[in-house]
């Protein structure tokens, strides 16, 4: 294995200014990184060779290599990405809306995409329904490895730097368990001379580390949060998410109430629906009560079964009845279509693979 070096994608523009002189070179390099999606120093045509040699001794450009790509019939593409230490993780390219054409065939609206990124290799939280949890925890991703997922997927899909994109931190790992690198990546995504992805377009999904929700809120980054609630009583929630013992439902709800939210926006509550566990109307009733007083939006997710799990996918009829109950009681509620289900790229289906074979 070659020497592991920090990546240029690990740094904000301000930080690079301290490392590279003069400042206009940093602006040029930023352009190569985030507008041209440079893979290597050789790509940076207007940077003097002496500077490139100096930088390449200490840094790499993009720390990721695409190892495998699986494309779903719905346009979802799952990427297996390898890092410098040989570890792998996954990121997913999701098509949210098709390109719209008028009668003469002119494009009236470009297709809309979302990138689902990983924040860790594996996860410590150990949810009993989650495939990622089965492989245990390996390590946190660096800020550069988080940023590189977006750069790599945009480049691979020929998605120009100034086209809008949404980011959801819903791949492998618990984002708030890697808070400092997550916060750094959010800042780098926001850079005006870089990808310019506003915080409003970034959603952090968490299993509910209530103290870290407060810490993220105190950073005032402007990101959205999505809470993986999944249960309305602590007994079931602890069965599904063991660390609920330390961060119970009440502590999460209180942390959400303190979280700075854009007044036009809502906090998303993800509710994974599992047959005969939490798909009954009594649970829907408790959910309405629990979310009273919060500007909430509920996203119902079908449990995606995988070999070896005892949990089952709910019926569509139960999902719809659950949704109807919430809507009739004043809650906004959507049912998430599982994108990329044929290639197991749906949320919660991401698991580290070592060059094609299961770890
Ligand atoms: N760790 C964070 C973000 C990654 S998981 C979190 O838990 O929120 C992203 C989402 O996928 C979570 O809402 C999670 O509960 C869901 N998920 C996990 N396993 C799943 C499965 N088998 N079927 C459907 N969704 C699942
Ligand atoms: Fe980790 Fe999220 Fe999976 Fe739970 S659902 S084990 S927090 S990745």
Image (cartoon, rainbow, N blue to C red):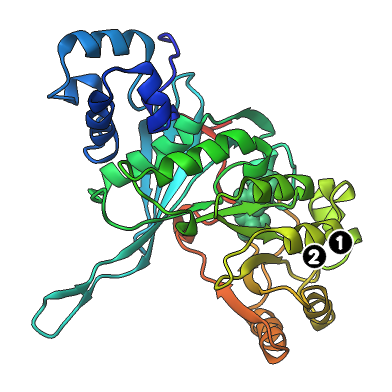
Residue 317, placed above or below residue 26: below
Residue of label 2: 231
Name the spot of residue 95 as percent of width and height, x first: 36, 62
Q: Which mark sits nearer the N-terminus, 1 or 2?
A: 2
Q: Tell me residue 231's x, y (percent).
A: 79, 65
Say left or right for 258 vs 107.
Answer: right
Residue at the spot x=89%, y=49% of the render? 245
**As rendered, which of 191 and 103 lies closer to the eye?**
191
Q: Work out whether residue 319 or residue 228 is closer to the camera in this orientation and state it.
A: 228
SS under mark 1: helix
Reply above or below: 324 against 121.
Answer: below
Q: Distance between the residues labelled 1 and 2?
A: 12 Å
What residue sits 37% from the left and 56% below the top?
165
* Residue 260, image x, y percentages: 65, 59
- Of labels 1 and 2, the one closer to you: 1
- Residue drawn 81% across and 61% down? 254
Which residue in the protein does label 1 denote?
250
């Amino acid at each position: 294995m070659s020497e592991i070096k920090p990546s240029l994608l690990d740094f904000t523009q301000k930080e690079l200014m301290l490392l590279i002189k003069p400042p206009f070179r940093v602006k040029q390099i930023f352009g190569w990184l985030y507008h041209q999606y440079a893979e290597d120093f050789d790509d940076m045509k207007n940077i003097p060779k002496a500077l490139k040699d100096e930088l390449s001794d200490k840094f790499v450009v993009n720390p990721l290599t695409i190892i495998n790509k699986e494309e779903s019939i719905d346009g979802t593409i799952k990427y297996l990405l390898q890092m410098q230490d040989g570890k792998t993780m996954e990121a997913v390219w999701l098509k949210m809306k098709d390109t719209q054409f008028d009668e003469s065939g002119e494009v009236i609206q470009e297709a809309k995409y979302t990138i689902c990124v990983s924040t860790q290799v594996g996860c410590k939280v150990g949810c009993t329904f989650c495939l990622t949890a089965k492989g245990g925890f390996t390590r946190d991703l660096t800020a550069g490895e988080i940023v590189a997922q977006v750069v790599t997927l945009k480049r691979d899909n020929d998605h120009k730097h100034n086209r809008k994109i949404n980011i959801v931190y819903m791949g492998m790992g618990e984002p708030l368990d890697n808070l400092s690198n997550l916060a750094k990546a959010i800042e780098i995504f926001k850079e005006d001379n870089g990808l310019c992805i506003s915080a409003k377009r970034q959603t952090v999904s968490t299993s509910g580390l209530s103290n870290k929700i407060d810490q993220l809120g105190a950073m005032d980054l402007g990101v959205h949060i999505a809470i993986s609630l999944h249960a309305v009583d602590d007994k079931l929630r602890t069965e599904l998410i063991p660390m609920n013992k330390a961060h119970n439902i009440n502590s999460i709800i209180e942390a959400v109430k303190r979280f700075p939210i854009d007044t036009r926006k809502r906090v998303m509550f993800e509710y994974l629906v599992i047959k005969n566990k939490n798909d009954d109307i009594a649970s829907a009733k408790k959910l309405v009560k629990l979310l009273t007083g919060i500007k909430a939006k509920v996203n119902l997710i079908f449990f995606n079964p995988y070999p070896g799990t005892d949990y089952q996918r709910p019926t569509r009829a139960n999902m719809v009845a659950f949704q109807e109950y919430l809507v009739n009681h004043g809650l906004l509620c959507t049912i998430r279509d599982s994108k990329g289900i044929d290639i197991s790229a749906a949320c919660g289906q991401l698991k580290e693979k070592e060059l094609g074979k299961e770890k």
